[in-house]
Amino acid sequence: MNCKNCNNSISSQNKFCNECGAKVVKERITLKNLLSDVFANAFGWDNKYFVTVKNLIVSPHVVFHEYINGTRKKYVNPFAFFAIGAAITVVVLNFFAEDYLRLSSNMNQKQIEIVDEVVVSEEEDLPKKAANDSDVRENKVLSSKEFKDKQAEISAKLQKGLLKYFNLVSFVFLPVYAFIAFLVFWKPYNYGEHLVINGYIQGITFLFTTALFLISLFINPVIYNFVVVSTIGYYTYAYTRLYRLSFGKIIVRLLKFVVIIAITFFIFVLIGFVFGNFILATN
């Protein structure tokens, strides 16, 4: 008999064509085998997407090496993988939009309280005369409260904007993360290869983030605070396996990576803060 896809001669005992790999179909289409094929292709563990997810969890360095060196048929394209992860996150976060904004607001409120503690400590360092002046103290308290309220309002607007344009923001940040990884880890991989690596890393961390978000909703909101830790942890794990670094070396590079990320994040937050103040001023 011949393969119906490539016309290659195959044995009747074969389940798959030796030439093109297509499944040998012998029976007529029924509702049962149609649904079975759909389920296997979409959700089967041998599905490309699930194979990629499984291997990225078990041995990420193998996925990176194989894809970069040309073994690409068994893995989802890194940018498609990234897009799928981002899409899953968007769907889940928008479905639970109010819960997401509440959790994000709580996290941001803690950050604002830290800033407020700094402001209070600066007030305590004021000259005694000013500190004893009730009017000055009252103005300072009002100023601090106004600052916190303004920060909370700006933060809420930014979170809503992030939720609305999550996919776009994610794609904008992907080359940024790849460039930072390129600066920190450097050779033997060029920027394009680091872009591939980060596409896979970001795609899998989207799934971790979504899972932690759902767990935090149904178990304990505190769990959501581990989102950043899980992302940094997977980055460390993936690059340690890829470069075969010792504990000391990965710590040094991780600190370097975190510092650059923190500076980049601070710049974006500063831009967002200025932009948010501009929006509030014009409203």
Image: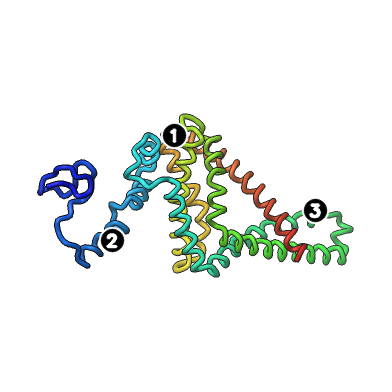
Q: Tell me, yes or no, whether the two marked residues, 1 and 3, touch with CB atoms within 8 Å.
A: no
Q: Amino acid at mark 1?
A: Leu
Of the numbered discs 1 and 3, the one sitting upstream in the chain is 3
Mark 2 vs mark 3: in front: 2
Label 1 or label 3, whichever lies nearer to me, is 1
Residue 225 x, y percent position in the rendering: 53, 58
- Binning the other alpha carbons within 10 Å of mark 1 as few (below 14), some (14 to 19) or many (20 upward) gives few
The disc labelled 2 sits on which kind of residue? Val
Give the residue number, with chain letter if any, for mark 3: 125
- In the image, 110: left or right of 134? left
Q: Secondary structure at mark 1?
A: loop
Of residue 173 and residue 242, the one placed in the foreground of this image is 173
Give above or below for 182 relative to 263: above
Q: Which residue is mark 1?
A: 245
Q: Is residue 276 above or below residue 61?
A: below
Instruction: Quote the CA–CA distance across marks 2 and 1.
Output: 42 Å
Closer to the N terminus: mark 2 or mark 1? 2
> Residue 278 appears at what percent x and percent y?
75, 58
| The label number, if any, that marks residue 189 in the structure image | none
Disc 3 residue type (three-letter): Asp
Kind of element beneath mark 2: helix
In-front residue for pair 57/247:
57
Give the Cα distance between marks 1 and 3: 46 Å
Q: Position of residue 117 (x, y in %)?
A: 70, 58
Label 2 or label 3, whichever comes before in sequence order:
2
Q: Which residue is mark 2?
A: 38
Q: Quadrant of residue 100?
A: bottom right
Q: Secondary structure at mark 3?
A: loop
Q: Residue at x 49, y 34 (%)?
A: 249
Report which quarter residue 196 is drawn in. top left
Crowding near the residue tagged with mark 3, few <14, some 14–19, many ≥20 C-alpha atoms within 10 Å: few
